[in-house]
């Protein structure tokens, strides 16, 4: 058994993570990011 590097393991975890997400979870995540970005931008414009 060969020992995998840390980054290789991370990449495989990420790939399997995204394969396991269903489309509604992805949609909710994007909606959340968008909300966070808009909040951040609004704060920047006000300041």
Image (cartoon, grey):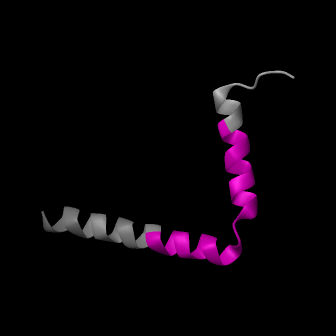
Residue 10 occupies quadrant: top right
Identify the residue shown where x is 59% and y is 75%: 27
Q: Work out which residue is located at the far left of the displayed protein and give it.
A: 47
Question: Is residue 15 covered in magenta?
Answer: yes
- Of residues 8 and 41, which is closer to you in this image? 8
31 lies left or right of 43: right
Instruction: Examine the image and state in which quarter residue 40 appears.
Output: bottom left
Question: Which sits in the foreground, 35 or 9?
Answer: 9
Question: Which stretch appears magenta?
Answer: 10-32
Q: Work out whether 18 lies above or below 28.
A: above
Q: Quadrant of the N terminus?
A: top right
- Give the residue at the far right of this rendering: 1
Q: Relative to residue 12, is residue 1 depicted above or below?
A: above
What is the x, y in percent for residue 29?
Answer: 53, 69
* Residue located 69% across and 55% down the image: 17
> In the image, is 27 to the left or to the right of 37?
right
The percent coordinates of residue 7 (x first, y second) are: 64, 31
Counting from the top left corner in percent of width and height, residue 16 is at: 74, 52
Residue drawn at the location 69% of the way across and 74% of the way down? 23
Image-based side of 1 in relation to 22, left or right: right
Left or right of residue 12, residue 43 in this image: left
Q: Where residue 11 sits: x, y (%)?
A: 69, 40
Q: Residue furthest top?
A: 2
23 in the magenta segment: yes
Predominant SS of the magenta segment: helix
Residue at coordinates 53% horizontally, 70% vertically from top-left?
30
């Amino acid at each position: 058994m060969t020992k995998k590097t840390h980054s290789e393991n991370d990449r495989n975890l990420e790939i399997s993570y995204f394969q396991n997400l269903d489309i509604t979870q992805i949609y909710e995540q994007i909606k959340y990011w968008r909300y966070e970005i808009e909040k951040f931008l609004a704060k920047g414009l006000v300041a």
